[in-house]
Amino acid sequence: MKVAFFSVVPSPYQRDMFRALAQTPGIELSVFYFEAGVPESPWPKAPLEPYEQILPGRGFSLGRARLQVNWSLPDLREFDVVVCNTMLTSPTGQWLMRFALPGRPWLFWGEKITAPRGWRDRLSAPLGRAAGIAAIGTVAERDYRARFPRTRLFNIPYHCDLDVFLATPRHTFDGTPVFLLCGQMIARKGVDLVIAAFARLNAGRLLLVGREAELPAMLAPLSAEVRARITYAGFQPPEELPRFFAQADVFVLPSRYDGWGVVVNQALGAGLPVLCSDMVGASHDLIDPEVNGLRFPAGDVDALAAAMQRLVAEPALISQWGDASRQRAADWTPAKGAAKWLRALETVVAS
């Protein structure tokens, strides 16, 4: 089965799954990217695999959206099925879905669409003609099911390589819990919320990893005592992240919105309890409340502080919930993701 994926940029977390899919018997994979990278991308460039290609073209920003125009596209008749990933604002993506793919088996793969309603409906209109939609997580699946009730749906979130996280020994708890947040230091990620919640604790340390962005303004109001318990490690490339996760006892992601949140996958591999807002897509698929972590309402500093304080007061839960996270990580390997894709692709081609 000849399969083509079109995606925006080479994301290391998607590439883990592509690598596994390329090794799956019965699949001949081609992956085409609209751009080698975008200005705000934190990922260092890595050599492409033989099945990957950057399409000729140009990308440009328009407000908060990133648009791409590409040419010399491959002959789609060469493929049995095509997958379009997260490309609704791209002129190239819209052209593919509206004009090049109708009449051929194709799927859309994406997170929940968050564009304003008018634009959302216009941009997503071609999805109603797709052979299937692969939703990135349960939250996205519910949204797509409500909006496209006659379209076949699959639930295929991100599955990334967790081997190094699993192989890295967990942090030895010394009685002072280390809370970790990994991501851009911006309000959308809730960094200001975790700082405010942490400031209420009279114990523990906070480790922040990611691009600095808005962090200086968030730290400015803190007392010297609270600031002394916070460590900022800066941006770290993906291959360095396991050693920072291994310095933590608890992972926190209080995002006001995150379509998925691959760092939650990584927290499972690292064997960490996870405290996550209910606006993080991954929290609904990867967290079993009271088993390997807790969900709390996005934007609720009181609820976040209470969750953090609970693990300060009940440190036995850190080990217990961390063990449960590592057990769940076994279900989130690239091989498991490739198996889900194989079933979806075979279903679409056979229909």
Image (spheres, helix red, strand yellow):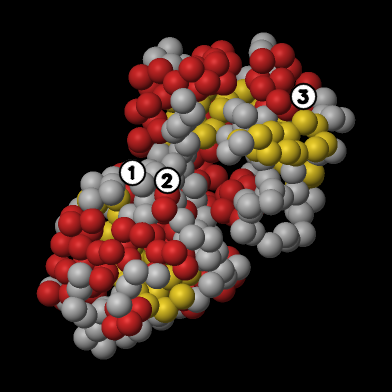
Sequence-first tag of 3 and 2: 3
Mark 3 touching mark 1, by CB under 8 A? no
Q: Position of residue 129 (x, y in %)?
A: 56, 13
Q: Which of 173 and 220 is in front in this view?
A: 220
Using a 10 Å C-alpha cutoff, classify the residue at mark 2 as few (fewer than 14 neighbours), some (14 to 19) or many (20 or more).
Answer: many
- Determine whether label 1 and label 2 are within 8 Å by CB: yes
Whether residue 329 is visible: no
Q: Nearer the viewer, residue 49 or 26?
A: 49
Q: Which mark is residue 76?
A: 3
Identified at 73% across, 17% down, the residue is: 100
Amino acid marked by disc 1: Met
Secondary structure beneath label 3: helix
Residue 317 appears left or right of 339: left
Give the class, few, some or many, for how many residues have Cα within 10 Å of label 1's Cα (few <14, many ≥20).
many
Rendered location of residue 326, percent (x, y): 34, 65
Q: What residue type is labelled 2?
A: Asp
Please indicate, yes or no, whether residue 261 appears anywhere in the rendered image: yes
Q: In this view, does 264 lie above or below 60?
A: below
Q: Which of marks 3 and 1 is in front?
A: 1
Residue drawn at 57 percent across, 53 percent down: 13
- Furthest-right residue in this view: 72
**Among all residues in the image, which is located at the extreme left?**
313
User: What residue sits right under mark 2 in the picture?
Assistant: 258
